[in-house]
Image (cartoon, helix red, strand yellow):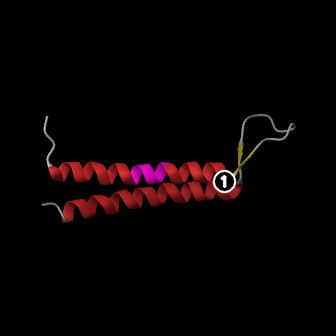
Amino acid sequence: MDIDAGMRRKIAVSLGTSAAFVVLLIFVGLEYTTDPTPSEPGGVVLQEPGGTIFVGLFALFVLAMGAVGVYLDRFEE
């Protein structure tokens, strides 16, 4: 199976955007979590600013993937 150059570019750009999103989610998760106190049952707790940033990152990801799709469609060879 042979993949032409245009399709390789689309795959690379999409994977790069997705990888950047995952890295940002990991960074926010590491930065805005706290260990629970003995009075708090459960695992790690996400602080309030981290939740807001997560929602913002999801919205940014949707917009970024839309922009990447438009870019790749517009500049297709």
Q: Would you identify the image quadrant in which residue 44 lies?
A: top right
Please count the marks in the image: 1
Give whichever of 21, 45 is nearer the camera: 21
* Residue under the point 22% across and 48% down: 8
| Crowding near the residue tagged with mark 1, few <14, some 14–19, many ≥20 C-alpha atoms within 10 Å | few
Q: What stretch of residues is rendered in magenta? A: 17-22
Seen as rendered, the residue at the extreme right is 39
Magenta stretch contains residue 36: no
**Quadrant location of the N terminus in the rendered image:** top left
* Residue under the point 26% across and 64% down: 71
Q: Would you identify the image quadrant in which residue 45 lies?
A: top right
* Residue under the point 46% across and 60% down: 60
Q: Magenta segment, principal secondary structure?
A: helix
x, y percentage for residue 21? 47, 52
x, y percentage for residue 30? 64, 49
Instruction: Give the left or right position of residue 8, taking residue 46 as reference.
Output: left
* Residue under the point 47% across and 58% down: 59
x, y percentage for residue 11? 27, 48
Amino acid type at circle 1 is Glu
Residue for badge 1: 31
Label 1: element kind: helix
Give whichever of 55, 11 is nearer the camera: 11
Instruction: Give the left or right position of residue 45, taking residue 38 as reference.
Output: left
Instruction: Give the left or right position of residue 29, taking residue 77 as reference.
Output: right
**Quadrant location of the C terminus in the rendered image:** bottom left
x, y percentage for residue 29? 62, 49
Q: Is residue 45 above or below residue 42?
A: below
